Image (spheres, rainbow, N blue to C red):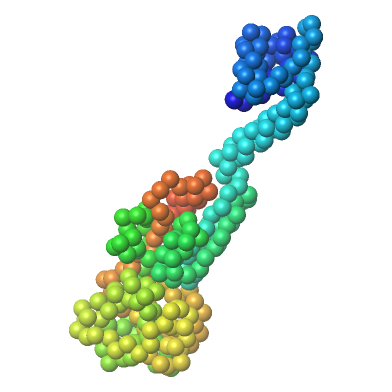
Amino acid sequence: MELRHLRYFTAIVQWKGYREASRRLYIAQPSISQAVADLEDELGIKLFSREGRAAKLTPEGQVFYEEALKTLVQAERSVATAQRAAKGEFGRLGIGFIGFIACSFLPDLIHKYKTRHPGVSLRLVEDVPSGQDVAFDRGEIDIAFTRPLSTDRRDHYETRLLFSEPLVAALPKTRKIRAKRIRIADLAGERFIVFQRTSSPEVFDTIIRVCNDNGFSPRLHNELNNMNSVLATVEAGEGVAIITASARNLRADNVSFFRLQPDDVRIDFVAAWQKKEPSIALKLFLELLEEELPSIRKGARFR
């Protein structure tokens, strides 16, 4: 049974005969007659009791007519819904992000996306990189703004570099330092507060490597899971931290930030999504992201 069978059948009822239905549909009358005959054979019932030129519905034909109308309406609704979805008029999109880094561009990006596609439902998930991996696995997010992916995940994801940022030293303001830069080697005797490795392996390993390259292994005093906590602990005088420059977006009134010397290390910040056919909502978001990439990079220039 095809939708055209139902259309021909309902047209015969609506236009009170084969001849008028044929004229209205621009279909040869024998084709309509054959379609209805095929329909009756498939159903095993008679839909019309023919009285002269009139096509009168049988009782069972009347029941089938009412259901056929519902089916055609639903089919039209399905087509319209699919077409609206293809235009991005509705759908769902999950976005994972690291708040203190993405805050410089994500609000504006989301606002522009919602203006263009107000029917798309957004789910925002703020988490560390390892938490975003879990969110991907659970199907909670479709795209993440995060650090470079681990080796075991790279083959399964597409990524787009947004920007690269330097490292800075964070010290309590009670330490009166007039220089604008701090030599990494001069931090050798300090207690270090770090963002724990399980949360962001890329950042943790880079910081350890930078210290090693400058002649010492950092004395790890606290390993925390939140950048606000890292800065609060520095502020309390419990140690110093080497962090990414974007952490300066956080409010830490009693922490001073210094560029490092040497200053030859950068940590990437990327957009990542799974290697599969993207949903319409994700595809449209990626198109917007590409449009906005120049301004995102311009706003992320670190002094």
Position above or below: 160 against 168:
above
Name which residue lies at 69% across and 21% down.
45
Q: As drawn, which residue projects farthest toward the front?
A: 44
User: Is 31 on the left-hand or right-hand side of 64?
Assistant: left
Determine the residue positioned at 40% across, 69% down. 130
The quarter of the image holding the C terminus is bottom left
Judge whether residue 144 can be spotted in this image: no
Q: Residue at x 39, y 79 (%)?
A: 195
Q: Position of residue 42 (x, y in %)?
A: 61, 22
Quadrant (top left/top right/bottom left/bottom right) for the N terminus = top right
In this view, the residue farthest toward the top is 52
Q: Position of residue 251 (x, y in %)?
A: 51, 79
Residue at x 35% of width, y 80% of height: 242
Q: Name the quadrant containing residue 37.
A: top right
Using the image as rendered, state which of residue 218 and residue 67 is in the foreground: 67
Left or right, residue 37 beside residue 194:
right
